[in-house]
Amino acid sequence: WWTIGFSLYASNIGTEHLVGQAGAAAGTGLGVASYEIAAGTFVVLLGFLYYPVYRAANVSTVPEYFEKRFNPLCRYLLVVYSLVSWVMVRVAAPLFGASVIFDVILKMDMWVSSVVVVVVTVAYGIFGGLAAVMYTDVLQAGIFTTAGLVGMFVVYRVFPGGLSELQGTLASAGQTEFFDILRPWDD
């Protein structure tokens, strides 16, 4: 069960969170976290709501449910839409990030490194199966959690006065709403 939990965590957090969301928070405040807080809440809520539906229909995936509920065409349209949107949103940015790292550290061409990353990822997924993917997610969750904690400690070393000094520095920079998770609708 613990690998499933870490896999869910690692599948929903990535470089776009550690870099992109951290950058957005640095510029606008912690209000960007409200999306993630709401997403986690709704994932749990949807799990409790849809598990009985899936169990009664004797299905284990959303496309399978769509096929039983509607028709096979709906299943395949959902699969195609999901794959295209997943590649566009969740694969392109991390793949680009990895290729930049390979370019900077190893001086490897970005296109070559992108192909290498994709081939290695597909190979361990095919040859190692779901267990390999799950254990890789566990490792990734550990790396991301460690990176987040190290980043937090670095910030607290930069501001030795702790949270109050950080708040004072932000206030002097005009970011008085930095720690507000709930922001006005027109923000």
Image (spheres, rainbow, N blue to C red):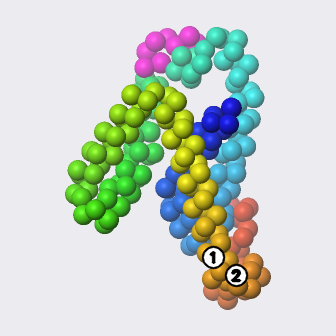
| Mark positioned earlier in the residue sequence (2 or 1) | 1
Asked if residue 112 lies in the magenta stretch, the reply is no
Give residue 170's position: percent from left, percent from top: 67, 82
Report the front residue among 139 and 28: 139
Task: Measure the alpha-carbon separation of dots 2 and 1.
Answer: 9 Å
Report the residue at 59% width, 51% height from top. 142
In the displayed structure, 32 sits above or below 39; it is below
- At label 2, counting other C-alpha atoms closer than 10 Å, the crowd grade (few under 14, some 14-19, many 20 or more) is some
Q: Amino acid at mark 1?
A: Val
Report the residue at 70% width, 24% height from top. 50
Confirm or deny contact between disc 2 and disc 1 (CB under 8 A): yes
For disc 2, the marked residue is 166
In the displayed structure, 25 sits above or below 166; it is above
**Which quadrant would residue 165 be assigned to in this image?**
bottom right
**Which quadrant would residue 120 be assigned to in this image?**
top left
Query: Residue 8 shows which numbered tag?
Result: none
Report the front residue among 94 and 127: 127
Residue bounds of the magenta highlight: 66-76
Magenta portion: prevailing SS class: helix
Give residue 32's position: percent from left, percent from top: 62, 60
- At label 1, counting other C-alpha atoms closer than 10 Å, the crowd grade (few under 14, some 14-19, many 20 or more) is some
Report the residue at 24% width, 52% height from top. 111
Give residue 17's position: percent from left, percent from top: 54, 56
Q: Secondary structure at mark 2?
A: helix
Q: Residue furthest bottom?
A: 172
Q: Amino acid at mark 2?
A: Leu
User: From the viewer's perspective, is 8 left or right of 102?
Assistant: right
For disc 1, the marked residue is 155
